[in-house]
Amino acid sequence: MIWTPNQVLEQSRLWVSPWYPPNSTHVVADGYELYIVGSEATLMAYRGELQDRAEITDGAVKVAADHRATSLRVTVGPDEPGAEPALPELSMATDITVVATIDILAMDRDGFDSRHTSTPTDVEVIEVRTYDQVAEYETTSALAWSYPPPTADSIQSAHERLKPGSFLAYSAGTPSGTGGYTRAGDVARFWGAAVVAGQRGHGVYRSLVAARLDNAFAQGVTLAIVHAEPTSSPILQRLGFNKFGHQHTFAIRIEPTLQPPWSVL
């Protein structure tokens, strides 16, 4: 199957990540799903009945304010390359700024060339399957993302939720990076690749990309898609991914008048 640009962008629209940071507060209310770190909320998804984007965003601001957040991050897109980032005017917020641009990258199986993803001989990538591998994965991922170390309970929970598609990289025998993908029909959604700071620059990230491509395409997937940060997008494009568009993340400052009058005991 040859994927057209419009089909790739539609796959990007359909992708709603269920992930939230382990040190965050997860909120589900009035059809909205958010996570909050400190005083900043991030909108994950909206599953309610509203259709107007401005009304949906206004509602997200209200839910965030109800949970004491003073700002909200909202990601919109996909947009065609070169399009100006746009968020509708909101009645409940001021100081709306673009804080990130995410590239929508994809690779068709027919365009996969393994020569672009040659990997160092001292880097090994495995698919996570056992409890001990889950423990190493969770510990390495936390270190790479600068999150608190996992607890025994969180490791046990991760092992119980484990599905195919999580990968752990070793550099010279040392756990050095993690990454994964989720299959949605013929599409592999790549997520979460990160390398421990002291191991960067040694081909670990490239090896994680190659292992996931090999695994996904061997399973019958015909498209690999990534929502790539500015730091990883150039690497992925050198490995054969093509850019089809982008998303923009807006930071919305929540007006103090929206904050509920909590009593102080």
Image (cartoon, helix red, strand yellow):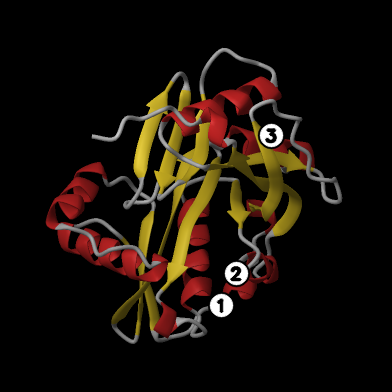
Determine the secondary structure under disc 1.
Answer: loop
* Residue 185 rendering spot, x and y as whole percentages: 52, 35
Residue 41 visible in rendering? yes
Query: Residue at label 3?
Result: 10
Residue 192 vs residue 90, the one in the foreground: 90
Query: Residue at label 2?
Result: 114
Quadrant of the rendered image containing residue 132: bottom left
| Mark number, residue 71 | none
* Residue 13 rendering spot, x and y as whole percentages: 64, 35
Callout 2–callout 1 Cβ contact below 8 Å: yes
Determine the secondary structure under disc 2.
Answer: helix
* Residue 233 rendering spot, x and y as whole percentages: 65, 64
Can you say which quadrant of the picture contains the N terminus?
top right
Looking at the picture, which amino acid does disc 2 mark? Ser
- Residue under the image location 50 percent in, 60 percent down: 214
- Residue under the image location 52 percent in, 37 percent down: 43
Quadrant of the rendered image containing residue 199: bottom left
Query: Residue at label 1?
Result: 118
Q: Report, in whole angstroms, how far the alpha carbon at label 2 lies from the one at label 1.
A: 7 Å
Determine the secondary structure under disc 3.
Answer: helix
Residue 21 vs residue 38, the one in the foreground: 38
Asked whether, in this view, residue 108 is left or right of residue 221, the answer is right
